[in-house]
Image: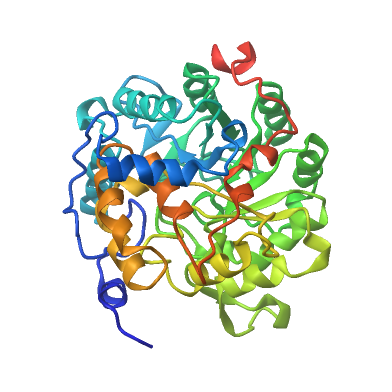
């Protein structure tokens, strides 16, 4: 293996809970400058013009946009447990500081500042383009009891619905409903009626086993409501949890029940036991297990991968190369991938290195400086432009990957339904 600077630093880098990806060399420093508008440089305008060429703005969707909150505005529907009083408090405090800077939100008015910046960035997108906002339910035990002590981040469905209602032409939203909740099926129906177009899980952080038979009725309800399940798979470091629950092979159960499953980050980090060879099967890269599922004919049309975080230095290795190979125009994954930014992570400057991507041959070196200039102004546009300009063998990812609205169009766009947004 050739040890580039990116690989060396990723191998020995510091992990932060904010994105749980290895730091790269901070070619732009550590602090997001939080500039307004877009830079007027000709090179940046050309970068964006070329990025949007061939993409239908009416279908353009960023399918992985986080909404975070700490409750500092008095809203009890969001919470952030930084571990105050425990050994993890310094990391939790750092995470909050890093997220606040990435989202250009003052730490003492985090919730309002986060939403204001997100709305401004969304409104700056081309007419018709939208973002999918993600909720996150609490950790629950098998009896359906929520445990605040084991819940690192909680973003309630009503909170996300209210944020989406701030700009209904710009936002879709995904609910999060833990399957062990006593009211899980009723809540699924409530959020569907309230305009949710998908359901979001992070199994390791929420204590969800996707392979449990106890989820079967829940899966039947998801399939019946035609609500896609967006779920993390593979190793994740955004919140404490049990990575065994992120084994991609555990997603066979919802697929077998007819659920459309979108695997966040294409399971591109870490390794898990090969459950196809028994519970004690050998460890296999999670991306390889995801690729195995994608190659099984039974899952065609229902299993998707999401590109969020794939350009981060901790993930931009073999998984990114393989996604580029199979996701180019005419590739067999061109119609089975959907783009997502993982906002606000693209604004955490050390996580993603355009220079390293250029060094690895996936990006024209002439685009590094325009991308750097763009990132300090607009992290959403930066992430989109970066991925649109990635190349392998002179070919780039299919335009359809960025037109993700087609995947979430089955439930309608009633984001501002009074049943949710006015709560």
Residue 86 seen in this snapshot: no
Residue 123 seen in this snapshot: yes
Q: Is residue 394 left or right of residue 298?
A: left
Residue 357 vs 213, above or below: the answer is below
Residue 157, image x and y in percent? 55, 29
Residue 161, image x and y in percent? 54, 23
- Displayed quadrant of residue 55: top right
* Placement of the C terminus among the 4 image quadrants: top right
Which residue is found at the position 66% from the left and 33% from the top? 197
Which residue is found at the position 73% from the left and 70% from the top? 295
Residue 397 vs 201, above or below: the answer is below
* Placement of the N terminus among the 4 image quadrants: bottom left
| Colour setup of the view | rainbow
Which residue is found at the position 54% from the left and 11% from the top? 422
Residue 41, image x and y in percent? 25, 39
- How many callouts does the rendering have? 0
Q: In the current view of this chain or complex, which residue is farthest to the bottom? A: 1
- Displayed quadrant of residue 334: bottom right
């Amino acid at each position: 293996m050739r040890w580039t600077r990116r690989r060396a630093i990723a191998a020995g880098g510091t992990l932060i809970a904010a994105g749980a990806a290895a730091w790269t060399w901070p070619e732009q420093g550590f602090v997001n400058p939080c500039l307004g508008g877009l830079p007027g440089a000709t090179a940046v305008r050309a970068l964006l013009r070329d990025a949007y060429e061939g993409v239908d703005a009416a279908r353009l969707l960023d399918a992985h946009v986080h909404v975070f909150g700490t409750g500092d505005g008095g809203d009890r529907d969001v919470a952030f447990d930084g571990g105050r009083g425990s050994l993890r408090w310094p990391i939790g405090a750092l995470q909050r500081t890093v997220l606040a800077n990435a989202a250009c939100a003052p730490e003492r008015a985090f919730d309002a500042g986060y939403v204001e910046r997100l709305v401004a960035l969304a409104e700056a997108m081309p007419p018709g383009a939208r973002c999918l906002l993600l909720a996150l339910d609490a950790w629950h035990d098998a009896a359906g009891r929520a445990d605040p002590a084991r819940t690192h981040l909680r973003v309630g469905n009503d909170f996300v619905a209210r944020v989406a209602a701030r700009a209904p032409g710009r936002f879709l939203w995904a609910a999060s409903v833990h399957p062990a909740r006593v009211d899980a099926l009723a809540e699924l129906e409530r959020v569907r009626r309230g305009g949710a177009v998908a359901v979001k899980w992070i199994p390791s952080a929420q204590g969800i086993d996707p392979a449990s038979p106890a989820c079967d009725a829940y899966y039947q309800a998801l399939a019946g409501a035609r609500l896609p399940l967006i779920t993390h798979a593979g190793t994740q470091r955004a919140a404490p949890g049990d990575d065994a629950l992120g084994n991609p092979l555990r997603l066979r159960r919802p697929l077998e029940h007819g659920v459309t499953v979108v695997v966040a980050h294409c399971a591109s980090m870490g390794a898990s036991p090969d459950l196809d060879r028994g519970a004690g099967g050998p460890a296999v890269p999670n991306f390889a297990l995801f690729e195995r599922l994608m190659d099984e004919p039974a899952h065609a049309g229902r299993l998707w991968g999401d590109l969020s975080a794939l350009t981060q230095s901790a993930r931009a290795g073999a998984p990114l190369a393989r996604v580029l190979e199979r996701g180019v125009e005419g590739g067999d994954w061109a119609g089975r991938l959907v783009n997502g930014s993982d906002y606000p992570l693209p604004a955490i400057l050390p996580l993603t290195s355009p220079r390293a991507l250029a060094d690895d041959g996936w990006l024209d070196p002439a685009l590094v400086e325009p991308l750097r200039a763009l990132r300090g102004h607009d992290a959403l546009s930066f992430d989109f432009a970066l991925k649109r300009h990635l190349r392998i063998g002179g070919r780039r990812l299919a335009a359809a990957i960025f037109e993700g609205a087609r995947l979430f169009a089955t439930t309608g766009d009633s984001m501002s339904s009074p049943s949710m947004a006015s709560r």
